[in-house]
Amino acid sequence: MTNPSLSASALEDILDRDDAIALLQKAIGRQSITGNEANFVDLLQAEMAARGLSGPIVEDFMPGRPNVWGTRKGNGGGPRLLFIGHTDTVHVDGWSDHWAGDAREDPFAAPIMEGEIWGRGAGDLKAGICTALSAISLLDSAGVSLKGDIDFAFVGDEESGQPGSGVSAGIKHYVEKIEAGDISRPDFVIYVEPTRLAVYPAQIGFFIADIKIEGKSAYFGVPELGHDALKASHKIMSALWAHSDAVSARARHDLIGNGFLLITTLEGGGYIAVPEHCSISLIRKLLPGEALDAAAAEIEATVRGAINDPNIRIEITYPAGRDHALGGEASEIDSSHPALVQLQSAIAEAMAGRGALEGAPFWSEKSFFTNRLGIPAVYCAPGDIRNCHTFEERVSVEEYLSGIVAFAIFIASYCGVESR
């Protein structure tokens, strides 16, 4: 940094650690399992207003389920930056039993243990939200006046697992408002999924396929009178595994590896009889550049091609539509994009050994910006996706505080600072 007052060491000296840690603990304390986003949005609205964001605007994307967004206006002449993340978390089933008698027994208590803040949503992704909000407060403490505008948007319905939810309804609502001109279009987007302060310019795509196989039941003593759905499922699974090997062999992405499919569920059987019904579920990983429709068509051809018995009926459905009717699209931006390089540099200055270029081993919602709107977007935030959705969810205090400093440096570098 050319401005000494915006160096990592100078910002670390004035960072209000107690405020930043308290913010994350309060965020974790607001239970916001998918469908109950309003409980967290209420806190965010108050915190955004307290930190000088205009608005903040709260608007339902579904009845009783709000998004919230606000803006820190710059003085003009700089690009527009958006920090965005989801407000909902996965469930906490079994958490309290797992940690019974431990300080972590309450998944929303947010205890600090051995330098880590524990709780549901700690990493996925309340640390990212709080990092972005605390960064603007840090720049205020440093007396920084920005040129560019910074938007903060927090949306619901990203996580899967709750009935009738998890279809990205929140971000669809927000993106539609950008398309309609009701919300200003950003120039660069940071979606605050946990990356351990690496920068992810690429993400996998996916779809889930549920395959129902129907034959005909018959008493076990006369199996020739039936049509065995379970036997058909064996042929289908063998064909699918062979297809997965072929998919994996045909392409590899430098950041996110090979495509493949994984059979995740097999259910079926009969009671002393030829099984009449069987079902298979699978998930397919796609690489950037792979068309989701084409990949699904390959699955259908593989499944139907494995069975040559007209008495076996097959139905295939896709229950997890996101930014595509069948699933979520893969996406990537150029790893040499100037804003991405600036972000890497800011992180490396704030925390040694961080800021590496990696690929997202998950699907989240940045593709709504890169693919639908044509806006460059990356994932970046404290937290480790490998412990998220588990009883081990936590975030390092050091990484979280370093992330605040890194985001502050990046904001100043990207948006520009008014001369004093």
Image (cartoon, rainbow, N blue to C red):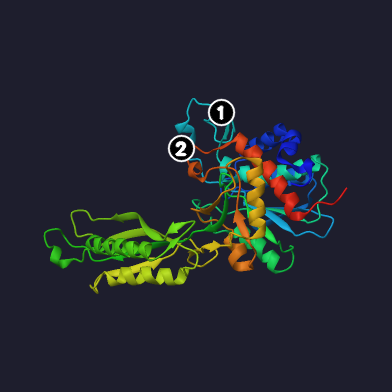
Say if 141 sits above or below 260 in the image.
above
Please indicate, yes or no, whether residue 343 appears anywhere in the rendered image.
Answer: yes
Q: How crowded is mark 2: few (under 14 residues within 10 Å), some or many (20 or more)?
A: few
Indicate the position of residue 381 as horizontal and vertical percent values.
Answer: 61, 46
Q: Label 2's element?
A: loop
For marks 2 and 1, give the one nearer the viewer: 1
Residue sitting at the far left: 221
Q: Label 1's element?
A: strand
Tag 1 or tag 2, which sits nearer the N-term? 2
Say if 124 sits above or below 261 in the image.
above
Label placed on residue 218? none
Q: How many labels does the image show?
A: 2
Q: In which quarter of the image is residue 307?
A: bottom left
Query: Which residue carries the number 1 mark?
Result: 113
What separation in Å lies between label 2 and label 1 (alpha carbons)? 20 Å
Residue 191 versus residue 403: which sits nearer the camera? 403
Question: Does residue 222 appear left or right of residue 286 in this picture?
Answer: left
Q: How crowded is mark 1: few (under 14 residues within 10 Å), some or many (20 or more)?
A: few
Say if 123 sits above or below 219 in the image.
above
Indicate the position of residue 116 as horizontal and vertical percent values.
Answer: 57, 33
Indicate the position of residue 28 as horizontal and vertical percent values.
Answer: 61, 39
Q: Quadrant of residue 157?
A: bottom right
Residue in view at x 44 percent, y 57 percent:
257
Question: Does residue 69 appear left or right of residue 157 in this picture?
Answer: right
Please indicate, yes or no, whether residue 64 appears anywhere in the rendered image.
Answer: no
Give the residue type that dot 1 points to: Met
Residue in view at x 83 percent, y 49 percent:
145
Say if 257 sits above or below 5 in the image.
below
Residue 216 versus residue 329: which sits nearer the camera? 329
Label placed on residue 94? 2
Give the residue type that dot 2 points to: Gly
Indicate the position of residue 86 as horizontal and vertical percent values.
Answer: 61, 51
